[in-house]
Amino acid sequence: MESKAFTRRDVLKMGSLTAASAFAITIAGITVPTNSWAMTVSTLSNTQAKMLLSVCRSIYPHPNIDDLFYAASVESFDKQAAQSPDLHSLLVTGLDDINQRSNGQWNALSENEKAAILTAISSTPFFQTVRGNMVVSLYDNPKIWPLFGYEGPSFTQGGYLHRGFDDIDWLPDANKE
């Protein structure tokens, strides 16, 4: 079987067609759905991972943030659990407890019902571990900072004194005398 060598002209034609196609897709407004990602776990089961994602979202609810960012935290838990049998046991036991408290209907519960269950277990090692991990893995993600209006750290730009110190627009104007 003989393989065909591409000429420079062939490569340029293919590149032009690819660029034109990408431009047409952009102009047409075709987008990839936000839920087109897949959570990858190896230690937790898919059911446990989805439930943990839901628990994480209930602990730190942000309706304008996609599940993708919560899933990254769950994947982080999964990797840590693969290295630590104690963490794996803690996560599985905690999720089983929540499942039992919700009569196996965690996803069908209202946010108020979920909050009541999470409040009841808020002093458990499971809850404290999930809460502590989430506060770092979720809020330390630079990709979601713009959704909160956070411009990122300013130490590389000389601090906030001359950049961002008085950017807030949600406080009423002070009466000047």
Image: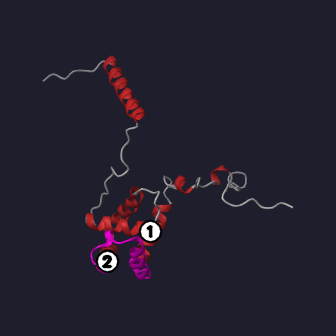
In reply to whether residue 118 is colored magenta, the answer given is: yes
Q: Nearer the viewer, residue 24 or 125?
A: 24
Choose top left, top right, bottom left or bottom right for residue 168.
bottom right
Tell me: residue 19, above or below residue 145.
above
Q: Nearer the viewer, residue 174 or 149?
A: 174
**Residue 145 point in image, percent of width and height:** 53, 55
Mark on residue 133? 1
- The segment highlighted magenta reads 100-126
Q: Earlier in the sequence, mark 2 or mark 1?
A: 2
Q: Which residue is mark 2?
A: 102
What is the magenta segment's predominant secondary structure? helix
Q: Indicate the secondary structure of the residue bearing disc 1.
A: helix
Query: Looking at this rendering, what residue extends furthest in the right direction?
Result: 177
Q: Quadrant of the N terminus?
A: top left
Crowd rating for badge 2 (residues with CA inside 10 Å; few <14, some 14–19, many 20+):
some
Q: Indicate the secondary structure of the residue bearing disc 2.
A: loop
Q: Is residue 139 left or right of residue 177?
A: left
Residue type, label 1: Asn
**Residue 58 point in image, percent of width and height:** 42, 69
**Residue 32 point in image, percent of width and height:** 36, 44
Tag nearer the camera, 2 or 1? 2
Q: Nearer the viewer, residue 153 or 122?
A: 122
Residue type, label 2: Ser
Choose top left, top right, bottom left or bottom right for residue 26.
top left
Mark on residue 93? none
Look at 55% across and 57% down and name the residue there: 148
Q: Is residue 145 left or right of residue 35?
A: right
Q: Quadrant of the C terminus?
A: bottom right
Choose top left, top right, bottom left or bottom right for residue 19.
top left
Colour scheme in use: secondary structure
Q: Is residue 84 left or right of residue 138?
A: left
